[in-house]
């Protein structure tokens, strides 16, 4: 392998560029209108509580968000800082993992840039992902701990691996497959097999189990709440024979994998197009281990799809399992001994260009979209509505009840001192919370005063003792211009005060 002298500094340069990109992402999100996406809304709602579990998702990201809000207050900037800090730390620890198995600084940097090619990272994470972000950081930590343990085992590296696995399980339940695949991938390698059979492996398992245990107990007591929603999403198609559903599920898995890896494979293929034959043939112990991990992961996924009768697979569910792929490609290139002169620049420039262009698209979308009648959640004027009704009444609410997740979360953003409730909440408020007054009830009212109060909202108000079947409500209606509204377009709200 031939590498320019600057190769040893390449990883540091790329990590600085990644840090700059995520600072830009924080600035971008902080300057958008103060309305929330779906995941953000749920996080803001959940931040009222500190609990062992919250619903469909494990609690690690919620705990981190609760801590950030407790320390720095509730704001869009605080939400964005946490997410982008975790994304940067993913790149940082992925770079440390790459340093353990790659000699070339250039290829270490290529591997780090490679993870930015995944749509779940450069697009979806900036739009509406949260728990997945914590899980990919845990995956990067695990890969670093895994390689450290194989190369320089110590009690500390085994403990590190156990903590990383615990973080992963507390971020996404499907993280389980990553350490399982790693263990199976090592077994055929005589040199490293003994690391799996080492007594310190029991310590790693024990520390992971100890850290996960409190949430695991909650999980077992709330099994349907924790898993039911995801299972329903995976089983979109229930008609037809089981064989047909298996084919549909495997096809969905294949297409989701292809969508996730296509940008990386296309770019890597173009940059190393003259060396692809040598790269494909090249092998080393590390290419075998990481390649085996990927194959095992994909095989287990196929078995799960067929066993669970899944017919819908989302790309964001798979990004955990794709994380070793950029490293695998870099390992293959190093094993082939290819020339690296100019390759990093050719690889990195389009990746950063697309990533920055994506931020620009997400930033400009709420401004340009209204010109063609396309309004996003960021255009919803929930903040201006709240300010108007509070100014009109002359007092802020002590209790806010939103008709849906976005309204509830965005209202909490504007009324951080109030208790916020909503229908079908992942965590229910104690009965005493509904005794707070004044209470403000808000719902979407697309047809103005012709829109009835949503039945789910009436049910919540009735069960909480606030009203008797909805007849005690005295609804009012207000039309508020969208953020960046075109042609006087307005968002219609229904609301009621309860004293």
Image: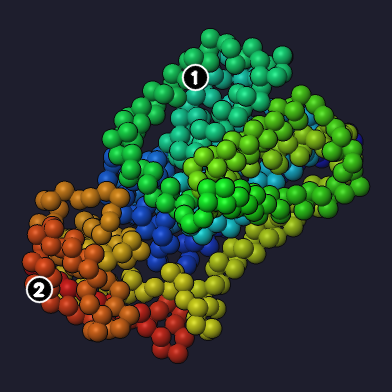
* Label 2: element kind: loop
From the top left corner, tell me how far across and down residue 132 is, in percent.
Answer: 50, 46
Disc 2 residue crowd, few under 14, some 14–19, many 20+, Cα 10 Å: few
From the top left corner, tell me how far across and down residue 4 is, in percent.
Answer: 87, 39
- Asked whether residue 116 appears in the rendered view, the answer is no
Residue at screen point 30% across, 74% down: 444
Whether residue 181 sits left or right of residue 127 in the image: it is: right
Residue at screen point 60% across, 50% down: 247
* Label 1: element kind: helix
Residue at screen point 45% across, 38% down: 173
Disc 1 residue crowd, few under 14, some 14–19, many 20+, Cα 10 Å: many
Whether residue 365 sits left or right of residue 278 in the image: it is: left
Q: Which image quarter holds the N terminus?
A: top right
110 vs 176: above or below: below
Residue where numbered disc 2 is placed: 471
Q: Which residue lies furthest to the top in this view?
A: 199
327 vs 182: above or below: below
Whether residue 358 sits left or right of residue 216 in the image: it is: right
Residue at screen point 56% across, 72% down: 364
Q: Which residue lies furthest to the bottom in this view?
A: 487
Q: Earlier in the sequence, mark 2 or mark 1?
A: 1
Query: Which-is-in-front pick, marks 2 and 1?
Result: 2
From the top left corner, tell me how far across and down residue 413 is, in percent.
Answer: 32, 61
Whether residue 366 sits left or right of residue 394 in the image: it is: right
Residue where numbered disc 1 is placed: 204
Coloration of the structure image: rainbow
Please state which of residues 1 and 442 is positioned toward the viewer in this rendering: 442
């Amino acid at each position: 392998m031939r590498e320019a002298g600057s190769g040893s500094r390449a990883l540091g340069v790329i990590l600085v560029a990644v840090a700059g990109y995520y600072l830009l992402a924080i600035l971008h999100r902080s300057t958008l209108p103060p309305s929330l996406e779906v995941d953000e809304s749920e996080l803001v709602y959940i931040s009222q509580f500190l609990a062992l579990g919250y619903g469909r998702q494990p609690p690690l990201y919620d705990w981190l968000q609760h801590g950030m809000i407790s320390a720095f207050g509730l704001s869009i900037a605080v939400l964005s800082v946490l997410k982008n800090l975790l994304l940067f730390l993913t790149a940082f620890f992925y770079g440390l993992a790459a340093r353990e198995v790659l000699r070339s600084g250039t290829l270490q940097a290529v591997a780090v840039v490679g993870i930015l090619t995944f749509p779940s990272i450069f697009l979806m994470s900036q739009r509406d992902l949260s728990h997945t972000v914590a899980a990919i950081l845990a995956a990067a930590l695990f890969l670093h701990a895994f390689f450290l343990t194989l190369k320089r085992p110590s009690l500390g590296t085994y403990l590190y691996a156990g903590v990383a696995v615990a973080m992963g399980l507390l971020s996404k339940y499907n993280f389980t497959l990553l350490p399982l695949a790693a263990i199976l991938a090592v077994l055929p390698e005589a040199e490293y097999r003994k690391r799996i059979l080492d007594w310190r492996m029991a310590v790693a398992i024990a520390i992971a189990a100890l850290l996960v245990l409190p949430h695991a107990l909650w999980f077992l007591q709330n099994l349907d709440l924790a898993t039911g929603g995801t299972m329903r999403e995976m089983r979109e198609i229930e008609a037809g024979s089981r064989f047909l559903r298996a084919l549909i599920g495997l096809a969905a898995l294949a297409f989701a994998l292809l969508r996730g890896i296509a940008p990386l494979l296309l770019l890597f293929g173009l940059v190393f197009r003259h060396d692809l034959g040598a790269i494909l043939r090249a092998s080393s112990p590390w290419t075998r281990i990481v390649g085996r991990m990927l194959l095992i992961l994909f095989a287990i996924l196929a078995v799960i799809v067929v066993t669970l009768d899944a017919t819908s697979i989302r790309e964001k569910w798979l990004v955990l399992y794709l994380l070793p792929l950029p490293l695998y490609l870099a390992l293959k290139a190093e094993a082939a001994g290819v020339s690296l002169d100019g390759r990093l620049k050719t690889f990195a420039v389009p990746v950063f260009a697309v990533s920055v262009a994506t931020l620009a698209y997400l930033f400009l979308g709420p401004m340009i979209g209204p010109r063609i009648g396309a309004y996003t959640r960021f255009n919803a004027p929930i903040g201006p509505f709240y300010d108007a009704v509070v100014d009109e009444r002359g007092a802020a609410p002590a209790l806010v009840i939103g008709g849906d997740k976005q309204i509830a979360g965005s209202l909490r953003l504007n009324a951080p001192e109030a208790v916020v409730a909503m229908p079908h909440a992942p965590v229910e408020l104690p009965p005493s919370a509904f005794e707070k007054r004044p209470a403000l009830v808000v719902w979407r009212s697309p047809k103005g005063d012709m829109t009835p109060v949503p039945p789910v909202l009436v049910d919540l108000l009735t069960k909480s003792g606030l009203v008797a079947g909805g007849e005690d409500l005295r609804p009012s209606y207000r039309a508020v211009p969208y953020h960046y509204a075109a042609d006087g377009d307005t968002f219609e709200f229904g609301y009621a005060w309860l004293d």
